[in-house]
Image (spheres, rainbow, N blue to C red):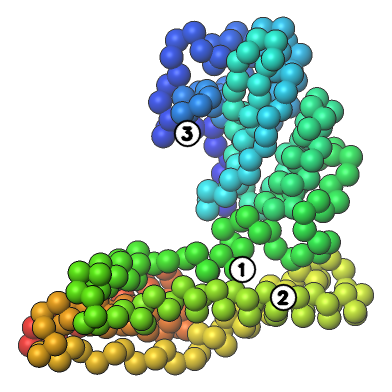
């Protein structure tokens, strides 16, 4: 289970005399982690301390944060985070307030009663990240349709695969492109470059499936929860069907007379095709990401050994 955290060791300590020291004076006894970002001092607080901190930030004259500039939702893969960017016109200082919480308990108290701009900011974060702001007067969808079934800005979003470039595969694509540019007219790396277009097409097909399932669920009068479950089941079935499709065979190796550069480009193409084939087979077997990477590494090693004559 993802845990709420108050530590953010990636950020350096803010300088002495920063707004963090003012918060320490105002919120004596409240635990928080202070870090210096490129723009603001960031304070990471516990969720149970969040509302008192925000009330003091707005009402205490030493802080006087009268403007909520923006609210940002972040998916850290081990849980969610909400970042509130505050500014004081009276004091002319700024701060970022950060709160972490687990996926399965994505609740935050609303601050719409403190800053009117929070009303729409929180509705947007609810739409796109699935954060429920307890006490908000109206959490109806602002940017998405009712009962969408997923949250577009979470990394678990069903169409996120379009951006999921594996490191080894991307390296092979870039290598093939660079070698093709160095040896124009010899070999064109068409197969790796077509992968992105194929992902776009696949994402479009998923979108069609999701829309069809939502329409059918609404025609049956299903609840929002049942509609969401139907969408997720349909996506899973679609992905399993696609993974069962056999991957295209790798292109033949370059002929020796084509020249050393052409052979290198062709080898890069062959590696890229092998990586894709191995990944598809691993996913069809339901392997973990770590086992999938191992399978890819072993396949590339076997290809290299075969090229060296065993």
In the rendered image, the vertical position of residue 79 relative to residue 187, given as above or below: above
Relative horizontal placement of residue 244, taking residue 124 as reference (left or right): left
- Label 3, label 2: how far apart the Cα atoms are: 37 Å
Image x and y of residue 78, in percent: 53, 50
**Residue situated in front as seen by the camera: 49 or 238:** 238
Q: Mark 1 sits on what residue? A: 158
Relative horizontal placement of residue 75, taking residue 170 as reference (left or right): right
Quadrant position of residue 308: bottom left
Q: Mark 2 sits on what residue? A: 210
Q: Mark 3 sits on what residue? A: 8
**For marks 1 and 3 on the same chain, the one whose residue lies earlier in the sequence:** 3
**Residue situated in front as seen by the camera: 95 or 49:** 95
**At x 88% / y 75%, what residue is drawn?**
218
- Label 2, label 1: how far apart the Cα atoms are: 10 Å
Relative horizontal placement of residue 61, taking residue 93 as reference (left or right): right
**Residue situated in front as seen by the camera: 31 or 221:** 221
């Amino acid at each position: 289970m993802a845990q709420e955290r108050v530590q953010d060791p990636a950020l350096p300590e803010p300088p002495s005399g920063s707004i963090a020291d003012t918060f320490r004076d105002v919120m004596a006894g409240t635990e928080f982690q202070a870090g210096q970002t490129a723009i603001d001092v960031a304070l990471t607080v516990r969720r149970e301390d969040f509302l008192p901190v925000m009330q003091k930030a707005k009402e205490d004259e030493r802080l006087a944060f009268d403007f909520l500039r923006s609210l940002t939702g972040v998916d850290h893969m081990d849980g969610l985070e909400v970042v509130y960017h505050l500014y004081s016109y009276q004091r002319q200082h700024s701060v970022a307030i950060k709160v972490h919480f687990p996926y399965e308990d994505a609740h935050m108290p609303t601050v719409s009663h403190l800053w009117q701009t929070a009303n729409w900011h929180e509705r947007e974060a609810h739409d796109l990240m699935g954060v429920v702001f307890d006490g908000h007067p109206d959490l109806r969808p602002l940017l998405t349709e009712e009962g969408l079934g997923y949250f577009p800005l979470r990394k678990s979003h069903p169409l996120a695969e379009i951006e999921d470039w594996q490191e080894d595969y991307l390296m092979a694509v870039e290598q093939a492109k660079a070698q093709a540019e160095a040896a124009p007219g010899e070999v064109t790396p068409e197969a790796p470059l077509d992968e992105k277009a194929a992902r776009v097409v696949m994402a479009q097909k998923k979108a069609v499936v999701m829309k069809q399932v939502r329409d059918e669920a609404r025609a049956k009068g299903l609840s929002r929860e049942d509609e969401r479950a139907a969408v997720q089941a349909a996506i899973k079935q679609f992905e399993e069907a696609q993974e069962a499709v056999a991957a295209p065979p790798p292109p033949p190796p370059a002929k020796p007379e084509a020249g050393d550069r052409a052979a290198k480009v062709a080898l890069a193409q062959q590696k890229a095709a092998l990586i894709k084939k191995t990944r598809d087979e691993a996913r069809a077997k339901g392997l973990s990401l770590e086992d999938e990477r191992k399978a890819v590494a072993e396949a590339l090693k076997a290809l290299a050994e075969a090229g060296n004559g065993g």
